[in-house]
Amino acid sequence: MNSLIRHSARCLRSVVFVAKPANVAVPGRLLCEAADTQKDLGEMVKKDKVVVFMKGTPAQPMCGFSNAVVQILRMHGVDNYAAYNVLEDQELRQGVKLFSNWPTIPQVYFNGEFVGGCDILLQMHQNGDLVDELKKLGIHSALLDSEKESK
Amino acid sequence: MAVTSEHIRQKLVHELAAVHVEVEDTSPNRCAASFKVVVVSSQFEGKPLLQRHRMVNSCLSEEMKHIHAFEQKTLTPQQWEQHKPSQ
């Protein structure tokens, strides 16, 4: 709700300075919201070390690909990450595709940097890169411990 | 516009100089809503996975608007040689 108020406030503010062109195809408010979403996304991806844009929630993924990302992170013991459900927010759903220049959901960010979608995370998991990338974030993969135990 | 497997295959061969392409329609009733592709191209050499996937995504950017789900594997000819025997 707060963010909604913030959105509208910001929109009102910027609209004041925009001269009204004749025959606008897209209402100014929509343009303004889209620009705000891009700005918000820039902050969202940096706020947490691991950020996932997905369909559903980690507790209840609504798509097989989103579920795969959740399961991979879980295997590595990564429980503490920011997950944004794009099904609850159409603006976010379209906005994040534009922001990342990536056509599909899920999308994964580490330290504000785009990592990839489900295929890439899966391949990083399989070839061991994910353990290294998590280490760079200061996250110790739980798979390292389970490997030791099995030896 | 219906996106066909053959259309995707031809586009990848043409624009990414792919030497091998596999396209599978993975939608439940083969309604061309989701695809799984394997692309083998020497243009992928020396490029990280993210960049390879971006190349495929931009090659198919028009088609992506009509595709609901898309899985991809991007390999260099050398990687494909190693990958193939297990098939």
Image: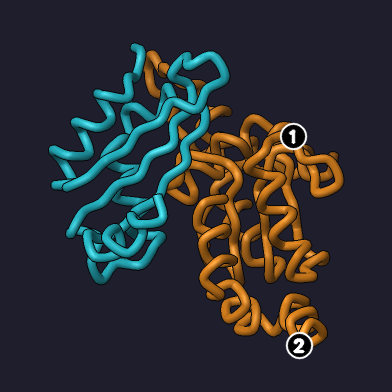
Chain colours: A orange, B cyan
Q: What residue does disc 1 label?
A: A62
Above-or-below relation of A50 to A40: below
Pointer 2 indicates a residue of which chain?
A
Above-or-below relation of A128 to A74: below
Whole-percent x and y of residue A105? 58, 41
On residue A151, the disc is 2
Above-or-below relation of A55 to A39: above
In screen coordinates, is B3 left or right of B9?
right
Q: Which residue is pictured at 35% across the width and 51% down the height?
A: B54
From this viewpoint, is residue A140 visible? no
Q: Nearer the viewer, residue A35 or B51?
A: B51
Whole-percent x and y of residue B9? 25, 32
Circle 2 residues within 10 Å: few <14, some 14–19, many ≥20: few
In screen coordinates, is A147 left or right of B51?
right
Amino acid type, label 1? Met
Q: Which residue is pictured at 73% across the width and 70% down the height?
A: A76
